[in-house]
Image: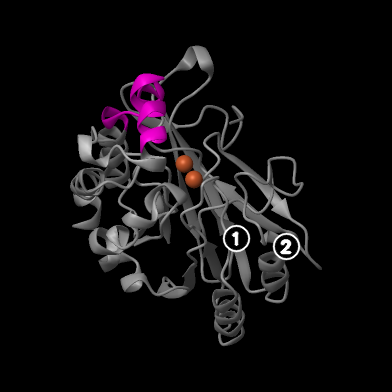
Amino acid sequence: MRVAHITDLHVEAPPQFAQLLSKRALGAVNLYLLGRSAHFTLRTVEALVDAVVRSEPELVVCTGDLTSTATPQEFERAAALLAPITDRFPFLVLPGNHDVYTTESLGRFQQHFGAWSNGGVYPYVRSHGGVDFVALDVSRPDFLSRGLTPREQLDALDALLGGGTAPAVVLLHYPLRDRRGGPYGPFTRNLENAVELEAVLARHPRVIAVLHGHEHHGYRTLIPRDGAPLPSLNPGASGYAFLPERRRTAHFNLYDIDPTGALGVERYAFDGSVFGPEAGGAYATGG
Ligand SMILES: [Fe+2]
Ligand SMILES: [Fe+2]
């Protein structure tokens, strides 16, 4: 089955004055005064959605950071931009740290995307083409950008994976490993208990891949475990502006997964007008 993986769209909408409070004020200064806004563009997301629709996937997954500062306007815009996908294909999504940017924004993700994220109850599993797709929510409001897998989700994931035999693909926002296969850091923006989550995954050989985002330059790496190491895949930010002079552009992945657990990877890159297969094969051009 063909699965499209998008992540880190970081859809923006100018904040209203009343929203310029606390952490969001810093984020807004960062976005609109220091120019980070130019790092993500609506044009890219429109081209992305068009490319994903044309690839006719049987399933689309999104590993978080749909918005930049989790305002109602950003969620509305993200939902509208993704409608050509969510109207046509099965869609699975989970929040990134930017979708739970402040305590006050909690609940908004579920309000706008709960229909595609089990109403906000994690972990959840959806079976497509003989493969179990299991989604975790490890994001939380944090003055830094650290994630944490709640104990209840670790236990529920262990039970869920132990209760089936089909190949399983685990989805979360944060990386477990960096691009060289080492523990992902720094501590200011990583998943605090990645080691605990890896220990659960290591107990279940039916897990064939981990899909994630958060790090905006994509990479694939391997998570060590007994027997075959576990592939970990990050397309890179799918909403990245086209900045070739800084070696930045947007990506998404297409996976071909069969019920035996075999996984093929194609990576698509944005060339400033359309998305096409990455030159030289998936990850040949680096991040
Ligand atoms: Fe992100
Ligand atoms: Fe993130």
| Residue at x 35% of width, y 67% of height | 117
Task: Between residue 275 and residue 195, name the one nearer to us.
Answer: 195
| Residue at x 59% of width, y 35% of height | 283
Task: Between residue 32 and residue 211, name the one nearer to us.
Answer: 32
| Lower position in the chain sequence, tag 1 or tag 2 | 2
| Above or below for 158 versus 4 | below
Question: Could you tell me what secondary structure mostly forms the magenta stretch?
Answer: helix
- The answer to whether 55 appears left or right of 212 in the picture is left
| Above or below for 85 versus 208 | above
Residue beneath disc 2: 195
Q: Secondary structure at mark 1?
A: strand
- The answer to whether 166 appears left or right of 28 in the picture is right
Residue beneath disc 1: 209
Q: Quadrant of residue 119?
A: bottom left
Q: Secondary structure at mark 2?
A: helix
Mark 1 vs ligand 2: CB under 8 Å? no
Which quadrant holds the N terminus? bottom left
Label 1 environment density (alpha carbons within 10 Å; few <14, some 14–19, many ≥20): many
Q: Could you tell me if the residues under marks 1 and 2 are in contact, i.e. CB atoms within 8 Å?
A: no
- For the residues marked 1 and 2, what is the alpha-carbon distance in whole angstroms? 16 Å
Residue 129 image point, x, y percent: 42, 70
Mark 2 vs ligand 2: CB under 8 Å? no
Is residue 125 shown in magenta?
no
- What's the residue type where badge 2 is placed? Val
Label 2 environment density (alpha carbons within 10 Å; few <14, some 14–19, many ≥20): few
- The answer to whether 252 appears left or right of 19 in the picture is right
Which quadrant holds the C terminus? top right
Start-end of magenta stretch: 25-44
Residue 5 image point, x, y percent: 43, 50
